[in-house]
Amino acid sequence: MKIQWAVLLVLLLVCDWRVKADGSDHRYKEGDRVPLYANKVGPFHNPSETYRYYDLPFCSPDHVIEKKEALGEVLNGDRLVDAPYELNFREDRESTTICEKSLSEKDIAKLRNAVAKDYYFQMYYDDLPFWGFIGKVDKDNLDPSEYKYLLFKHIHFDIFYNDDRVIEISVQTDPNLTVDITEDKAVDVMFAYSVTWKNTDIPFEKRMEKYSKSSSLPQHLEIHWFSIINSCVTVLLLTGFLATILMRVLKNDFVKYSHDEESLEDQEETGWKYIHGDVFRFPKYKSLFSAVIGSGTQLLTLAMFIFLLALVGVFYPYNRGALFTALVVIYALTSGIAGYIATSFYLQLEGTNWVRNLLLTGCLFCGPLFLTFCFLNTVAIAYNATAALPFGTILVILLIWTLVTSPLLVLGGIAGKNSKTEFQAPCRTTKYPREIPQLPWYRGTVPQMAMAGFLPFSAIYIELYYIFASVWGHKIYTIYSILFIVFIILIIVTAFITVALTYFQLAVEDHEWWWRSVLCGGSTGIFIFFYCLYYYHARSDMSGFMQTSFFFGYMACICYGFFLMLGTVGFRASLLFVQHIYRSIKCE
């Protein structure tokens, strides 16, 4: 156990939350060199398709120095290298030549293709991110064959400082200082830059606020609050529906079923009381069912920890890789929860092969995620993109899985095996199951899943757009408190709607509610995936095989995670409800 904690401590040190510029305190004297790193270039509309800065024929030093990066930065596709510009502290520069470069026909074709796809570059100056386009397309002529492709050859930096600290940086390009790269012919280009330093009163502590202001603008906040009000109305309506319908129906049922047995002798039992001997009959595929509940509980715990970190301010804008680091480390640490819940529940269901159940639990979410990653990493390698993980990073992730995730999963399983808790069934299960009566089509699994997933999805769909625009675009999302409220509403609505559908299922004497409650609870994940299809085609400009693969590949994994998590919520709520109503009557 000590070895595992030692390994985890080392990994946490490797995956440092904040990456500071050369370990400095961000204080400089006039003339000091301020760290400037070029990160990546790529098509503006394809956020996953990014390449190394020097993959394009820019001016490059003789020896390119790569910055050492934390795990989260590498997972984020960051590949920082020394930039060719010298932006020393408080040193203004007029037009300064970086280099005079002879661009071959091949280089011209490469740059023209980049300009046509709206390539942008990203850099970090004293840990402040900034962006700029490498060129523009002159579309004065409507005929695409007559478009002019222009490459910017001069960049101007405006840098703001307060005392001895850098506060803000912006980049501008002069549309008059360009090179025409429309035709495939070699050309000599002189790349240059200029720098202007300006004083500002903004304190150092608030220098990151400008990056998060866009998501806090009044018009955006109104939409977020409208989203929450919409969700709250949904919750209130659903709660009211459950309170009036279910409680009234249940009250009548309790009164009817608690009458003297003499008055019931001549009546045939109907409804959910009629199946009391079957309702706690254990489901088919016990091992898979327990693995789903274990994995779903782990993912719910992971989500709660991520929200906790977000609310305390860990994921401030452009804290490079912090979210990915948190996801990897917390998932590894919570694997013991999955092992404990899955094994404990499996043994409650009178399962015998708990070791196989534990292996299934460990692979249920990680397996599809790993296969998806292998395919997408192969695609990224074929494209030579920064999204392709280096061998060393893959090795670190495998070490985390081998030395932290797997041992904790096994320890959780052993603890679950030794807990020896018994399943609390208020009614005795009969030897032979009752036949389920013929039911109309809308009582089937798929229609019920459609009804169950629609309400929770309607409570979150407005917020989904902003999350997608942040993850798969260039917008910034920082209102984590609102997102947390929406997440809690999602959990509540999922639990309520699953309980309601479980009651209606039992009322028509269909006792196979175990898997149905998981499928109905998790169906919101399927709705989110359909929203992915809509977002890709209607709300984004993403294109190309690599970007499409990354979008649908990783979103499929996220939707699958939501399916497991919300399916667990639906089952737990239904189980509590079913145990409660059958405990309230006399079971023969």
Image (cartoon, rainbow, N blue to C red):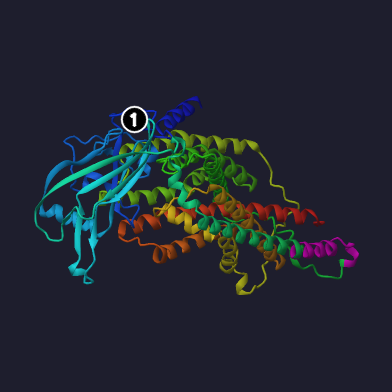
* Above/below status of 3 relative to 197: above
Q: Within the image, what quadrant is residue 157 found in?
A: top left
Q: Is residue 74 left or right of residue 176?
A: right
Quarter of the picture holding the C terminus = bottom right
Q: Nearer the viewer, residue 435 or 78?
A: 78
* Above/below status of 268 relative to 484: below
Percent coordinates x, y for residue 138 in the rendering: 22, 63
Disc 1 is placed on an element classified as helix
Q: Residue at x 48, y 59 (%)?
A: 465
* Above/below status of 326 relative to 31: below
Residue 511 visible? The answer is no
Amino acid type indicated by mark 1: Asp
Q: Within the image, what quadrant is residue 394 found in?
A: top left
Q: Is residue 179 left or right of residue 526?
A: left
The residue segment tinted magenta is 245-263
Percent coordinates x, y for residue 267 in the rendering: 84, 70
Q: Is residue 444 left or right of residue 194?
A: right
Q: Residue at x 54, y 52 (%)?
A: 564
Percent coordinates x, y for residue 20 in the rendering: 38, 33
